[in-house]
Image: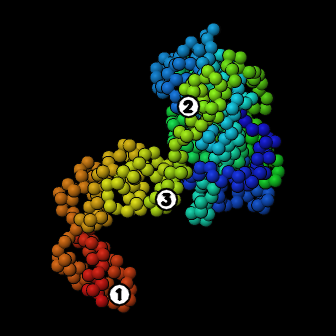
Amino acid sequence: MAASSVAASELLHNTSKHLSVLYSKAPCVIRQISTCLRCYNQPQLRAESASQQLVGVVGLEIHAQINSNTKLFSSSPVCFLAPPNSLVSFFDASLPGTLPVLNRRCVEAAVMTGLALDCTINRKSLFDRKHYFYADLPAGYQITQQRRPIAVDGMLTYSLLGGIKRSQVIKKNVHIKQIQLEQDSGKSLHDDVRSQTLIDLNRAGVGLMELVMEPDMSCGEEAAAAVRELQLILQALGTCQGNMSEGQLRVDANVSVHRPGEPLGIRTEVKNINSVRYLARAIDYEIQRQIDILQRGGTVQNETRAYDAKLGETIPMRDKEGLQDYRFMPEPNLPPLIVFEDNASLPAGIDACQAVVLQKIREGLPELPSVKRDRLVQMYGILPEHSFTLVNEDGLMEYFEAVLKETKAGPRKVTGWVTNELLGQLRQQDMSVAQSLISPLALAELLELQETGHISSSVAKQVFQEMWSSGKTALQIIQEQDLGLISDTAQLHSICQKVVDSHPDEVHAIRNGNKKVLNKLMGLVKKETRGRADPVLVRKILQEETS
């Protein structure tokens, strides 16, 4: 796999502050993730001075499966969970005499991703053979782009919460060294019972984008936030579905520790992490493991490790002390890949529909996550952290806007219901927004009943729970259970007077200046009326009765 050199890593580490200024317009996200080790406001790991404190250095290599109907160099379809070896062409099986035919969709996806990440798109890129021998790699080599990848020198901006109360938004940049096109390998399925390994080549030849991020991050939280932002961008572009559980986005983390101002330490590579949460935990564990080794006087080994989610630890796979010779060579069966700036730059006789044209792809770029967040804040006046939640949860922004169109309730009120009540129910039952048992129209009806004064806010939440469990409409529930607001003022006066008369001590306290006791009386009225009383009117009546 492509990786940054130690010299480049040191240079980038020392100049990251300057780079963050140059790329201030890149997309950003606010991300808060619980991890084992916080990189902000964490206590000192040892009783050392700050200048001697060991800190983590993290770089990432991310393999994103291109969202395409067919593979990178063959016409075999791409389908998750298809029967083993049912999607394998002669080329995928590397039979003699077969030749690669480049999938234009994969090239356009890589170019679009590069543009969204502020990369420089190489007008001419090259394909190479990377030789290594695995049972699930029939040809004995992988077609990749080692010498001149399709996109280079990009930047991803993300944000996370810091400060004493984790309420301060901290923006960070990570430099993207390159994006390259390459083939995926097949799968080796190990059967320990029969002591055999089975090979499934359905995935062999599927198009990948490998994105190499420079070591600009210092902990698991930063890496997780960067990967989550990249995932959102790829999904918005449609270039990768980004489903990590299905292997569509796989992350390798290069982790080392050093003291600021000193050369970078020996790194380890944690392979094939398939969850943003596990990524944060794996990196934080590995940083602490290396710190503990060095503080005991030991030496960190240059090795490949895997993350065991059950143990919460990284475990060794193989050492990397010996430099592996991949014997890179130009791919003889593929000409240079040419990307044209616009239709005017196309050579005579070239069909524009068959060429990869930058101008066309640039014009087709969709609204990116950072732009969506800004639009939500500016258009609806909601808080930035709420815009983050709406954009980061798949389908939640569309749900929010659909509710807003059908009710007179304000955007902030709708945001509260969607991010608290709805999202709370979804997370409790491990459901997606698309699986919600309450449609946007049904929620809008409930909010409209509250907005027009038919029910109180407490009753509205009660009705919401009943809607979720019964599938009935808000109006049906209110009518069946007689939950509408009490409209008879005389009846409400009578209930309040009853509460006041039965609690003389509280009334005495209120008259002596303890106004907070009034809230207790309001709670008693609420209980008496089953939440059907207007709290504003109840407070006014109680104030009159206790004055």
Q: CA distance from mark 3 to mark 1?
A: 45 Å
Task: Give, as a three-letter code, the residue at label 2.
Answer: Ile
Q: CA distance from mark 3 to mark 2?
A: 32 Å
According to the picture, the residue beneath numbered tag 2 turns out to be: 66
Task: Give, as a three-letter code, the residue at label 1.
Answer: Ala
Residue 160: assigned label: none
Along the line of sight, the residue nearer the viewer: 87 or 429: 87
Give the mark count. 3
According to the picture, the residue beneath numbered tag 3 turns out to be: 377
Residue beneath the point at 79% across and 29% down: 322
Residue beneath the point at 23% across and 65% down: 454
At which x and y percent is residue 282? 62, 43
Along the line of sight, the residue nearer the viewer: 426 or 415: 415
Quarter assignment of residue 145: top right
Residue 162: in sight, yes or no?
yes
Q: Which quadrant: the N terminus? A: top right
SS label for mark 2: loop
Residue beneath the point at 63% across and 19% down: 137
Residue 287: in sight, yes or no?
no
According to the picture, the residue beneath numbered tag 1 turns out to be: 509
